Amino acid sequence: MTRRRIGLLGGTFDPIHIGHLALARAGRDALSLDEVRLMPTGRSWQKNSSTASAEQRLQMVQLAVRGEDRLLADGRETLRAGSTYTVDTLAELRVEYGDDPALVLLLGSDQLRNLATWHRYRDLLGFAHIACTQRERIGLQDLPIDVEHLVHQHGRDALPDAPAGSIVFFVMPPVPVSATVLRERLAAGDRPTELVPAAVLDYIESHRLYGARALL
């Protein structure tokens, strides 16, 4: 029986854009994942605030993945009181899914470089694998020493037949998107259909998020 592989992609998704979707699709295809769950943060301990509420960000993710193959929205972190820690989410998922399925945490290179600042980061691999890809110009060379040690200890050439414990790498096409610039464009009245799914843009305009004006 083939072990089920469940991909997990967290983020503020404020708003979700094509870069997030490209990463989810690339991880799904490169690692033969049965599904990828996109999980908007509730109250992120590393980011003081977001422009849209947790509920609105979840609704935008739900719109973005509608019709996508094996991409799902998961709102569990938006329902959690207090700060959101990835290790707690992984522990919850491990209880929910049991010991057998492989959980695969998808990260961009920016997040990997910052991994040693995460709450209980060394415990992550007890619950899941980590799969990383280079995002934009943030490279995977000369990693911070603590992260380099972790990769040296747990790095593998391919995702093993195991529920957790390894770090692997995959490739995605470059998709340069700045969330800050994107929000500025929305506030200026732009409708960047090349960066955001149309259904999400409609939601942003109808709820007047990021200073966007509703279409008349």
Image (spheres, helix red, strand yellow):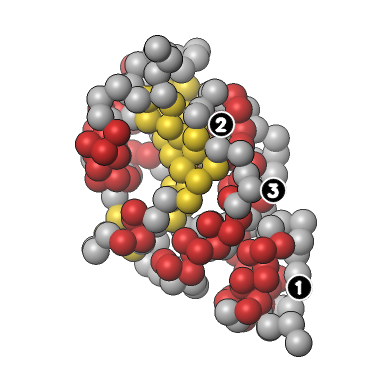
* Residue 39 in picture, x, y percent from top left: 43, 50
In the rendered structure, which amino acid carries the disc numbered 1?
Asp
User: Along the horizontal axis of the image, is 111 left or right of 118?
Assistant: right
Secondary element under disc 1, as helix, strand or loop, is loop
User: Which residue is found at the position 29% from the left and 50% from the top?
Assistant: 85
Name the residue tied to disc 1: 190
In the rendered structure, which amino acid carries the disc numbered 3?
Pro
Mark 2 vs mark 1: which is more N-terminal? Answer: 2
In the rendered structure, which amino acid carries the disc numbered 2?
Arg
Residue 93, above or below 60: above
User: Mark 3 or 1, which is nearer the eye?
Assistant: 1
Mark 3 vs mark 1: which is more N-terminal? Answer: 3
Secondary element under disc 3, as helix, strand or loop, is loop
User: Which residue is found at the position 71% from the left and 62% from the top?
Assistant: 198
Q: Which mark is residue 28?
A: 2
Q: Residues within 10 Å of mark 3 (few under 14, many from 20)?
A: few
Secondary element under disc 2, as helix, strand or loop, is helix
* Residue 31 in picture, x, y percent from top left: 54, 23
Residue 143 appears in the rendering: no
CA–CA distance between discs 3 and 1?
18 Å
User: Mark 3 or 2, which is nearer the eye?
Assistant: 2
